[in-house]
Image (cartoon, helix red, strand yellow):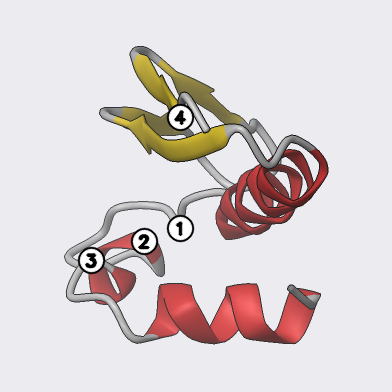
Amino acid sequence: MTRAEAERMIEETKAYTLLRGVRGEPPSDIESIVDVILRISQIMTRFREISEMEINPLCVYEKGKGCLALDIRITISNG
């Protein structure tokens, strides 16, 4: 996955408008979300036995302050 593909994935979500900042709220750290997507892509590619991974929720802070995965579920396949 490329950085451009990860950015496009985020832009296609309903949450993107909120992430950019609305109604006086500061923009969120979208770059940190891109980094998370790219790192997950690398992990999934490197470890083929991972069949599924879910992060929920991913708390995103103001631009430049990163994000934090509060819960992660990883499913490992048997074959």
| Residue, disc 1 | 27
Closer to the eye: label 2 or 1: 2
| Residue, disc 4 | 77
Residue neighbourhood size for the residue with mark 3, other residues' Cα within 10 Å, grouped as few (<14), some (14–19), many (≥20):
few
User: Where on the picture, by quarter, is residue 20?
Assistant: bottom left
Q: Do the residues labelled 2 and 1 touch (CB within 8 Å)?
A: yes
Q: Who comes first in sequence, dot 2 or dot 1?
A: 2
Secondary-structure class at tag 1: loop
User: Where on the picture, by quarter, is residue 46?
Assistant: top right
Q: In the rendering, which numbered label is found on residue 6?
A: none
Task: Inspect the image, locate mark 3, and give the three-letter code of the amino acid beneath it.
Answer: Ala
Residue neighbourhood size for the residue with mark 4, other residues' Cα within 10 Å, grouped as few (<14), some (14–19), many (≥20):
few
Residue 10 vertical placement versus 46 (above, below): below
Task: Inspect the image, locate mark 2, and give the three-letter code of the amino acid beneath it.
Answer: Leu
User: In this figure, what is the number of numbered marks?
Assistant: 4
| Residue, disc 3 | 15
Separation of marks 3 and 4 at Cα, in angstroms: 31 Å
Secondary-structure class at tag 2: helix
Secondary-structure class at tag 3: loop
- Which is more toward the observer, 74 or 33? 74
Closer to the eye: label 3 or 1: 3
| Residue, disc 2 | 19
- Which is more toward the observer, 44 or 30? 44
- Which is more toward the observer, 67 or 8? 8
Q: Are marks 3 and 1 in contact (CB under 8 Å)?
A: no
Q: Who comes first in sequence, dot 3 or dot 1?
A: 3
Q: Residue at (50%, 21%) from the top-left corner?
A: 68
Q: Position of residue 1 (x, y in %)?
A: 74, 73
Separation of marks 4 and 2 at Cα, in angstroms: 34 Å
57 sits to left or right of 79: left
Q: Position of residue 59 (x, y in %)?
A: 37, 29
